[in-house]
Amino acid sequence: MEFCSIITTNYINSLSFPIAMNFQDLKKIEKPDFYLDVAFRKANEAASKVKLKQTKDKERKIKEIELQKIDTAKQVLVNYLEGILKAYPSFRHLDEFYLELVKCTLDYPKLKKSLGAVNWCSKKTTLFFRKYNRLLRKSTKIKEIHDIKKAYYGRVSSLFKQIEDNLSYLEEARRVMRNYPTLKTSMFTVCITGFPNVGKTTLLSKLTSSQPEIDSYPFTTKTLNVGYLKEGYKKIQLVDTPGTLNRFNKMNNIEKQAYLAIEHLADAIIYVFDLTEAYPIADQTRLFEKLKDFNKNTIVFVSKKDITDKKMLDKFKQSYKMLTDIEELKQQLFGLIQE
Ligand SMILES: Nc1nc2c(ncn2[C@@H]2O[C@H](COP(=O)(O)OP(=O)(O)O)[C@@H](O)[C@H]2O)c(=O)[nH]1
Ligand SMILES: [Mg+2]
């Protein structure tokens, strides 16, 4: 089963930069019986519309009807399968961020194998159609004509049953991928990092026009919040990336998304410190140090200036080059983009 031939359409689509992968549009993937039922029903509908010129030749009439049935059934089934293949993103040309996200939230080999199986089923459905179409055309006996159609239906039913597990895995994968963030992988990107409750999401909403949910329990959201900033031709994608960088395999999906966004997409990081001590400063400093491993340009922003102790802030200023003003932060961010 060769998987590579199925991805051309999405590859072409993906060339229209900047890419914002959209995994939310994948349609629900059904069980084999669903597709078979629809196909056979439509085949009957189409057959009932077959108009025959005045003919007394009963065999010919039946043959036309059965030919119409297998032709319609084939078309419906192949359309469904090709639709699934086209809707899936091209993994070969997927940006590193999304590819890594797929690999760490799904069984990647199984996903590829499942798509390969769908492709195989589609090709086989067409091959069997050609064979049985030929047999039908050659046949002259009524009983044989009926039997040939039945045999084709039997063959495709069996093909679809064989890919039942593959279809169900693709549906499982779709439900996971539906929660992937929609990020532009080629835009200048800044990740907003820091401990929970320090004000990352609030900062994102103040910087951009996005209206993310504030105050929700940090790890209950299913996908990363994102917003955009524009000044002249300069555009910045800002991503709210929660997580305290525990061991990768201990992270939940949202923390994994955040980690991968920092690693693969971030051109710079805003590290948010909260000096009102929602979390001990020592812990916040430790995370700040850990983030240095990513080797990204980092801006320190101290949140909640309105409720922060002035002396504390002054003391902090001595050890860190930091900002507290949103407008200043914006200007620094635009300054990071090369003229
Ligand atoms: N007084 C004050 N509260 C803030 C500020 N920024 C955030 N908060 C509050 O801090 C809490 C956590 O903010 P949130 O943005 O959800 O933090 P996150 O977990 O880092 O995304 C919320 O109750 C916010 O209303 C600020 O500048 N001033
Ligand atoms: Mg938040």
Image (spheres, rainbow, N blue to C red):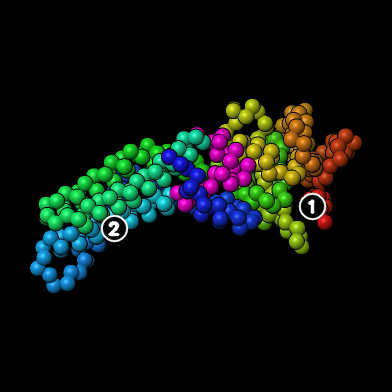
Residue 138 picture location, percent across and down? 20, 55
Residue 119 picture location, percent across and down? 41, 45
The numbered disc on residue 149 is none
- Towards the viewer: 216 or 106: 106
Q: The residue tagged with tag 2: helix, strand or loop?
A: helix
Residue 143 picture location, percent across and down? 11, 52
The part of the chain drawn in magenta is 85-107
Residue at x-position 56% and y-position 55%: 12
User: For this view, does 161 lie left or right of residue 111?
Assistant: left
Residue at x-position 83% and y-position 45%: 323
Quarter of the figure with residue 294: top right
Q: Is residue 104 magenta?
A: yes
Residue at x-position 43% and y-position 40%: 1
Kind of residue sitting beneath label 1: Ile
User: For this view, does 298 lie left or right of residue 137?
Assistant: right
- Towards the viewer: 271 or 79: 79
Q: Work out whether residue 105 can be spotted.
A: yes
Residue 26 picture location, percent across and down? 47, 50
Q: Work out whether residue 26 can be spotted.
A: no
Q: Which residue is mark 1?
A: 337
Q: Which residue is mark 2?
A: 72
**Label 1 crowd (10 A; few <14 / some 14-19 / many >=20):** few
Q: Main secondary structure of the magenta part?
A: helix
Q: The residue tagged with tag 1: helix, strand or loop?
A: loop
